[in-house]
Image (cartoon, rainbow, N blue to C red):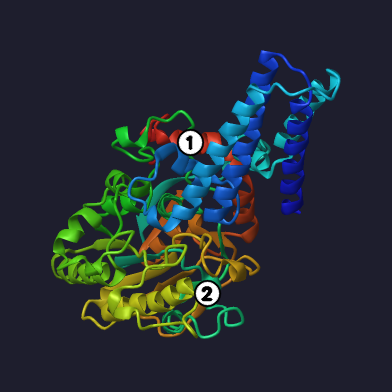
Amino acid sequence: MILFVIGLSILLIILAFYLFLNTKSTKIGKIVFNILFLFSFSLHIMLLVSYYFTGEGINDAVLYHIKYGLAGASFLEYWKIVLFTVISFILIFFIIHYIFNKTKKHKFRHLFIYISFIVISLSIVINPASYDLYNIYLNRNREVNFNDYYKSPSIEKIGESKNLIYIYAESFERTYFDEKLFPGLVTELKKLENRSTYFTDIRQVAGTSWTIGGMVSSQLGIPLFTPINNKDMKEKDDFLPIAKGVGDLLNKEGYYLTFYGGADLKFQEKGTFYSTHKFDEIHGLKDLSKKIDSEKNLNNWGIDDDKVLEFAYNRFLELSANKDKFGMYLITLGTHHPQGHIPKEYRNIMYKDGSNPILNAIKASDIIISEFVNKILNSKYAKDTVIVIASDHLAMRNTAFDRLEDAKRRNMFMILTPDQKQPKKIDKRGSTLDIGPTILSFLGYDAQIGLGRNLLADNISGYEIKKIHDNLISWKAEIKKFWGELAEDDIID
């Protein structure tokens, strides 16, 4: 259906162009038509590029990167789409120049100039990009009150405190576990799942479909919506300072908090996010690259996962020996779209015939992450440690996307505790918004965090969670205020 609508919109652009080109118009008419023509075609290019990256059109991830830039991103992997975009806009401006300077004989009466305006406007209205932008900015349902569902962040100790290791597995969704779609792909993480509490219905909701969106939602219990007129992120030294979440609450309880990631901390402003929310150490490409022997451990996005996890494990041993309570968050990058990045020592690992790059990367990451987790489980500090393995978000367009998009897609989320030897499956509906309060219950705390809910709590229903998911877009104005328009005392007790 969407392809039909896109095709119809393009046909309307062509018809409008033909009518206008063959009708006498004034200079002002040419200017107005060219503006509409440029806007209509720009929407199509924006939609195409967005689908290339997200697989779902224009969403908050796209708008976030438009507003705050792509510093730290690897453009080498996307040179084809960049070249296509540049060529497209050059072509459009040539067409506009031609329209503005046309001198050919006119076939139609002056009435058709108005018809051409109507047709080009209609092409904009039916464009799926317009529908996406409408849903993002204008679609509002005021029947459900935000304050009835938002829980002021709070924490209460209810048991023995545990240390936390949280692994964001880049784009590693639960769909890859499906044996019908990907037989034999994920083996090692399944072994870990069989001794964990694992969740099968973690959906992707608005404002959570890219890395920093997944981090914000899983820690602060709110989706990442950014103000249109917010100051440029490069000039800000805080990130959602009014919102409070896992880092703020654990810091309050005396936890020492660290973050490890192989990519540039400036990309998506991860460094600013973690520094705002009380992390004591924040490690990324700039400082970790000084610790590696050579460039053999580097890829287009940053440092290979095996080296980052090696640094993290050594720090885990130090913190376990020297800190009463600590939390460590990590993110991998080996399964980043479109093809992944496999560390040199794991490049002999292939899925089936090895023809699909991202599936090879998934296979390697399955082993790399599991090796890291098993080292912790086999250490003398395992009894004090809770380990979380979760997707940061669903996969974006990659070399296996044709199989993924037809599946029932869900995020991965499993929790391993020292005393659990048998699997516990949780089928309750949830999203990354619910991860924060859920994992804190495993650390010995009862916590409330924003729109998140403890998925193990008996008093939390799937209906309540669905109500939250269905109304996130309508609560954008309230959520954007966490960027600084509310007093801190109004947000956290």
Q: Quadrant of residue 238?
A: top left
Q: Is residue 242 visible?
A: yes
The residue positioned 48% from the left and 48% from the top of the image is 83
Amino acid type for the residue under numbered disc 2: Tyr
Query: In this picture, is 22 found above or below 218?
Result: above
Disc 1: which residue: 480
| Residue 85 badge | none
Amino acid type for the residue under numbered disc 1: Lys
33 or 146: nearer the eye? Answer: 33
Q: Secondary structure at mark 1?
A: helix
451 or 266: nearer the eye? Answer: 266
Disc 2: which residue: 176
The residue positioned 48% from the left and 82% from the top of the image is 423
The residue positioned 39% from the left and 49% from the top of the image is 154
Q: Quadrant of the C terminus?
A: top left
Q: Residues within 10 Å of mark 2 (few under 14, many from 20)?
A: many
Q: Secondary structure at mark 2?
A: helix
